[in-house]
Amino acid sequence: MRLAVVIPCYNHAHYIEAAIRSVLDQTRPVDRLIVIDDGSRDDSVRVIRAMGEARVELVEQENRNAFNAINRGVEMAAVDCEAVAVLNSDDHYHPARFEKMMPLLEGGGEAAVACSALNLIDDDDRPLAADHPRARWFEAAWSVGARDSLDMASWMGLCNFPATTSNILARADYMRANPFKPYHYNHDYYFLSGAALRGRLVLHPERLVNYRVHATNTMNTKASSLMREVLRQQVDFLRDFHGEMADDAEMRRRYKLYMAAAFDNVSAFHAGLFLHVLGGVLAGCPEEETRRRIQELEEESFPELAAFPNRHHVGLWRGDGPVGADGSLAEKLDGVRDERDRSKEAAAAWKELAALVARISGDRRYALARCFGLAPRLDRLEGKTPQEKLAALKARLAGTRWLREPG
């Protein structure tokens, strides 16, 4: 898998050489290094050129903000690279970052985006003091991950623990399909949360990126600016992911976990303000339209309608004290039972698949037709889940004339 690194640079003449060196000195070499200078007004471009590195592809543009610079770099990289990493011009990598992280994307699973733990540094590359406010926030954010069986969507709902675009390594096709949105602060949070909601975000536990905390970080802003953007992000989720979640019950389950965690977050999301904004939006929507949308939900497409969401809570009562008010135990029990049901459905689908494939393999007329190149291959499996593979195979068999009906 070919790998490119995109560095968006803006007024970081003091740091840019270290960022570039950390890419060029990787134990797993990168195939391309693209630096997009976003209209720097300092000596950043001069420093880059003075390095004399032929491996650096430098592009200069007028200032159009980090999200635009990254998207432009991704489009360039995706021409001939299957994986793209982003590195902010004031951060730098651990030398073995790609040697350790690329296998997460090359393993053949569903992972499309990977991140790692962070090493916090100050202006002079020293470890950030433990009592620094940002260090304390990160300790709180990452301590959440120590909980057993924590869903990645829940963790992202609680906080943006990966913290930075410098922590993003992703498949190029996924990045092109999900370009960074025009946020000032939250383009990384939106992108990473989307990957978590789709079940495509994975984590390497080692500290493989050095994230610099200094006075000019974009996160060092007044609370109202950041909180407004986080509110916008959450509203955008509802709008942008509506179609996907309508077709994907598992994604809806993850979104439920995400929002439950977001309401009890350690980040900059205020649930009361969010509900106030949604209320304002609904106030402008005709009541008949709201009722119509609710009535149009069908059990076949939305199986959640067929069971009370808190049906297991009553089973927690043992007469020796109150049931946990937060419902966490019931939630865990629901999760275990849902996983059991999914496993049963998957096992049944695999069993039926095996029977169909055996039927195809044992049909002599079909085998003879295949020998002479007259019949298409019928036993290929397409789809992500066993249920999807079974449905695709049944559809293919229903339209073929080469397979005899059993009996």
Image (cartoon, grey):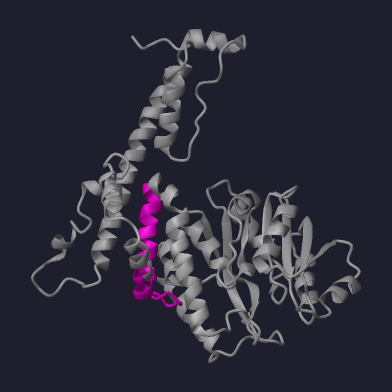
**Residue at image location 41% in from the left, 30% down from the top:** 391
Residue sitting nearer the eye, 405 or 99: 405
Answer yes or no: is residue 327 visible.
yes
Q: Tell whether position 256 is magenta.
A: yes
**Residue at image location 63% in from the left, 85% down from the top:** 127
Is 339 placed left or right of 327 in the picture?
right
Q: Tell whether position 349 is magenta.
A: no
Residue 357 drawn at (x, y percent) = 44, 23
Residue 58 drawn at (x, y percent) = 83, 64
| Residue closest to the far left | 319
Q: Main secondary structure of the magenta part?
A: helix
Q: Is residue 4 above or below residue 147?
A: above
Is 378 placed left or right of 78 in the picture?
left
Q: Quadrant of residue 34?
A: bottom right
Q: Is residue 372 above or below residue 5?
A: above
Residue sitting nearer the eye, 377 or 267: 267
Q: Which residues are drawn in magenta?
A: 249-276
Residue 42 drawn at (x, y percent) = 81, 80
